Image: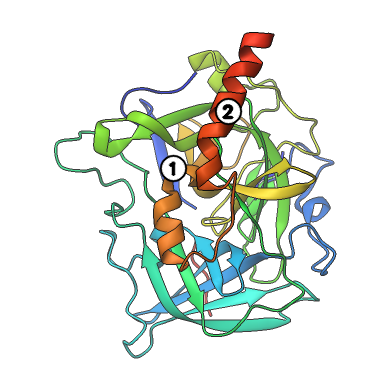
Amino acid sequence: MVLGAALTEASIFNGSTYTPMITAGAPPDSPSDHEDANTSSSAFSGVVSINIRYDGLSYICSGTLVGKRSVVSAGHCVDTDGNGSVINLNKPGSDVRVIFNSNGSNNAMMKATAVSIEPHYQGFGNCPAGVSAFCVNDDISVITLGADAPASAKIYKVAANPVTSGTHIIMAGYGTSGDGVNGFTVRPSFYIKRSGENYIDLFDGNDEQNFAGPHEVYYADFDGGGQNTFCTLYGACSPSLPNNRESGIGGGDSGGPSFVEMYGELMLVANNTFSGTFSGQTPGTFGTYFGGIILGSYTGYLLGATGNQIQLVPEPGSIALFGIALMLLVLRCRTRQAS
């Protein structure tokens, strides 16, 4: 993790490069200042690292515990061919291991018994037929454990209400880190998770509807050093956080959470899936951007993949009431690592 108006057309930014994936602000802020204590009392005790192994390869991703046996991560983390083919756990040498750091480092390592990818996901950057763009939508997976997760690990609810530009998010993950001046300088680790914050700026709609419809993808930029990229380029001028809080993400943070604070607790609003640069930028530095998938647009998949063992807030039956209440309120006054 690097510290430190909706789009209605194609998801690609001209002159930018997407990378499937908490970085610090400018020195003296550093990656170590953002490390979690790995205790049961930590707000991030249910944020896990994930080791995916197949064909002699080994990868690191991040994820979030949403049920006793259910972890949400990114689809591309468990895609073995870049076209949405989920890892075959029955194939020799293929497995998915979930590492908990909720009561000290590596207090539990558990193998997955099932893995699924959101059905519309066709590989990172791949679009539905007839859509000419670079599509990062639908990049979600659910990993099922063979036994209950440690009691020391928090289980997070999913915030299913609409997300707007300017929404404050808190990210966590196990990925590559560094700072906004030098970029990525610290390798990912299965046992060191970091946290940071940002504000959501922009959105993509549903790629199956040529980017119309509900928000499916969010974007945030890494402000600092006098740079506020999305404000300059697109007029999306969300607040910038203090140097020791503003953050981005790096390789290995893929699948990790973006939380919002609701009702006195952290709730999962998105999973983080990519970072990006514009021409001339160094990855992980100020002015770059990142984003992920808004989970409230995928509640049907999440309920099915977890066997309804996931708690949505508001619950599906109350979303319409939430919308009515909001309207009335307005009338009254958004990587790879060796095993």
Q: Position of residue 217 (x, y in %)?
A: 44, 38
* Left or right of residue 327, residue 297 in this image: left
Disc 2 target residue: 334
Q: Quadrant of the rendered structure where residue 108 is?
A: bottom right
Residue at figure coordinates x 58%, y 83% from the top left? 110
Residue 113 shows up from this direction: yes
As displayed, is residue 325 above or below residue 41?
above
As displayed, is residue 119 above or below residue 207?
below
Helix, strand or loop under label 2: loop
Disc 1 target residue: 297
Q: Position of residue 339 (x, y in %)?
A: 53, 80
Question: Of marks 2 and 1, which one's residue comes earlier in the chain?
Answer: 1
Q: Position of residue 286 (x, y in %)?
A: 63, 32
Instruction: Choose between 318 and 126: the one closer to the eye.
Output: 318
Q: Amino acid at mark 1?
A: Ser
* Left or right of residue 214, residue 91 in this image: left
Q: Residues within 10 Å of mark 2 (few under 14, many from 20)?
A: some
Residue at figure coordinates x 61%, y 73% from the top left? 68
Q: Residues within 10 Å of mark 1 (few under 14, many from 20)?
A: many
Residue at figure coordinates x 52%, y 57% from the top left? 255
